[in-house]
Amino acid sequence: MNRQLLRTKVQATMRQLIAERGYASPLDVLLSMEKLSAKNVDDWRSGKIPYLERVIQMNLPQLNVLLAEMKEVARDMDLTPSLTAYRRRTRSGRLPLRFSKSGAPHLEERYATHFLSRKLRGTKALAKSNPVPPATQR
């Protein structure tokens, strides 16, 4: 897949995810573009796969284009970046999941960033300012 086609697919996929869910993440884009399977994500989350890049059906230059294009689309759509912690449960606690072979912090952060729509940001802000009271027991 050439860079221009990849950029076009990333743009369309992100716009669709934002319309449906109010946010988009690299993981969601890769799943929607069928460059990553749900089974591989489950295996990664359970620790069977050491880092996610290992099972993504794209080469590293293509992944860099995808991540850069997501950032561009987010800027164009006025989306807010939100760093998300990806962790798995173990007997000894919660361990961070790795996206890249290198584990470089800047790269891990690029993979773990979700982009939120204005609508979703408003909903989250409202929830923080007006917490729902606990349910009463009957």
Image (cartoon, grey):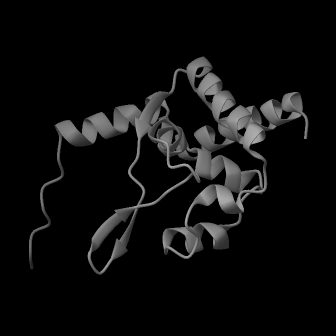
Query: On the rendered image, what quadrant is the N terminus found in?
Result: top right
Residue 4 vertical position relative to residue 48 in the rendered view, above or below: above
Residue at (27%, 36%) from the top-left corner?
Answer: 126
In the displayed structure, does residue 132 sit left or right of residue 114?
left
97 or 30: nearer the eye? 97
Q: Position of residue 84 (x, y in %)?
A: 40, 46
In the displayed structure, does residue 120 sit left or right of residue 69?
left
6 or 109: nearer the eye? 109
Q: Position of residue 112 (x, y in %)?
A: 48, 45
Residue 59 vertical position relative to residue 6 in the rendered view, above or below: below
In the displayed structure, does residue 117 sit left or right of residue 133?
right
Residue at (65%, 29%) from the top-left corner?
Answer: 68
Query: On the rendered image, what quadrant is the C terminus found in?
Result: bottom left
Residue 110 vertical position relative to residue 43 in the rendered view, above or below: above
Q: Position of residue 33 (x, y in %)?
A: 76, 51
In the displayed structure, does residue 35 sit left or right of residue 90?
right
Residue at (64%, 35%) from the top-left corner?
Answer: 67
